[in-house]
Image (spheres, rainbow, N blue to C red):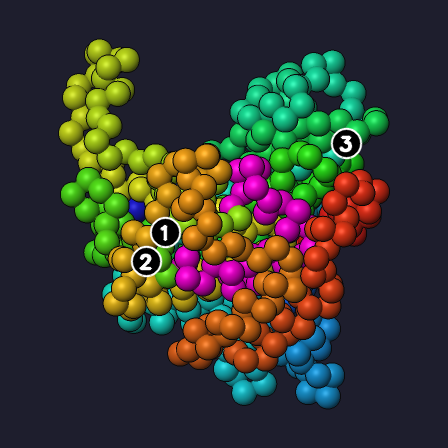
Amino acid sequence: MIKEDYLLDPNKLVQYLKKPSKEFTKQDLVKYIVENEIKMINFRYVAQDGKLKTLNFIISGMDHLDNILSTGERVDGSSLFTFIGAGSSDLYLIPRFKTAFLNPFSEVPSLDILCSFYSAEGKPLESAPEYILKKANHSFRKSTGLVFKAMGELEFYIKSPNHSLYPDVDQKGYQSSQPFTKWEALRKEAMVLIAQCGGKIKYGHSEVGTFSIADDGFEQHEIEFLPVEVEDAVDQLIIAKWIVRMLGAREGALVSWAPKITVGKAGSGLHIHMMVEKDGKNVCVENGKLSDTAKKMIAGIMGMSGALTAFGNTIPTSYLRLVPHQEAPTYVCWGDRNRSVLVRVPLGWVGAKDMIKDLNPLEPADSRDFSSKQTFEFRVADGSADIYLLLAGLIVASQRGLEKENSLQIADDLYADVDIFTPQYKEKLETLDQLPTCCWESADSLLENREVFENNGVFPKGTLDAIVKNLKSYEDNGLNDRILGHVDKIMEIVDQFIHCM
């Protein structure tokens, strides 16, 4: 990093230590703690329920500080994971120094650090979501020599009493500005704090969903991130969700990532953009077009898409969102700039040049190649996702696509160049597989494909068994048909899952 990078980086530790976070050492953190009079360390971690948890330490001296950072601490694994019994439940919680950030909410100056789980034998906990992602990433890189990068689009609703003098139009909230959106200031504050905590943000805006019920107003917002290495991509989403919820709680407003929060209104997804690099170059683009590498990965995701819902669409209301004509996928296909498909290749900067000069004639011509910004987008998942397992699953599916001999043919067969619900596409639509329509079917898809996820020891058998058991426990087979037209029954289910993950 050059000097200007340190000055522009919002992360206060990066500014102070003048090095990128991936180079943080224990001594760096001690230096920052001592010289900035930090009083508390918080170990942060994610267990089975997907929410960020906390273990607090008051620093009592240098020896104590060194002990915390050198050895971690014990936690009760049986209270965190259903697959760990109480008879032998102790786990180690070990801090990952590169994730350290200054807590933006604590009145006591506090440094927070994300942690990983280790077993009593001092080995990474095989079933920990964070470690499953790590294993998937390692397997992918070893097999392909490529670096997997990702970023998420974090969509959410904010609910609060409706006192707006400038009500927005129902379901027309896309990129509205104040005063026609009430919660823009909260979203902007969240973006600042997420960036200070290490998140790499692309942009934020209000989303389509806006409506009122009685005295309550609902606004949908989105914060989209920049592609970073996949393990970092999940960490920044986890921290972002915590920050947005904290700000909502401060304002007395409900924040929800739930895939569906009422009938007939836009749902919230968790769209995941992916790209792969070789020697720092995006290999999803070749000669100005989507590369064979990207197409093979897309084919792999197509083949595993039903099973991937077990990680990305984990509650009954997930399948109230995955219905036709709602800009949410229902059929297994992909396409360019097409929002009705499972994987979308968004508009990139391929072939579009000198637009800045066209509007700003004083600017010189810019010959740089910006096609490296090209990604492809998985549009199925929602806010109920176990983000670690979802990204691990996408990596496994992508690797499978790169390894299968007929992946390019599969990609060609499943390409959809128009809205798949247009009349001229009717014949093609009848040949496409459909996504699961409930948690029960999602569990069945996972069972049918479990060997792929268990390959190379990435997903432990017990983890998949626990996921299947949980999905089946909802007994929601045929639920959509049973509640169709019954708004009161739909809202009972919506309210039950409003606080997913």
Amino acid type, mark 1: Leu
Please tell me which residue is depicted at 61% across the width and 63% down the height of the picture: 441
| Point 27% across, 49% down: residue | 284
> Relative to 303, is 226 above or below?
above
Residue behind mark 1: 414
Q: Quadrant of the C terminus?
A: bottom right
Q: Earlier in the sequence, mark 3 or mark 2?
A: 3
Name the residue type under label 2.
Answer: Ile
- Callout 3–callout 1 Cβ contact below 8 Å: no
Determine which residue is flagged by label 2. 410
Residue at point 67% right, 73% down?
Answer: 469
Of pointers 3 and 1, the one earlier in the residue sequence: 3
Where is residue 380? Give x, y as percent: 52, 50
Q: Which mark is residue 160?
A: 3
Inter-mark Cα distance, 3 to 2: 47 Å
Helix, strand or loop status at disc 2 = helix
- Are dots 3 and 2 in contact, CB under 8 Å? no
Proximity of marks 2 and 1: CB atoms separated by less than 8 Å: yes
In which quarter of the view is residue 209 placed?
Answer: top right
**Element at label 1:** loop
Q: Which residues are magenta?
A: 301-329
* Image height of 115 relative to 331, above or below: below
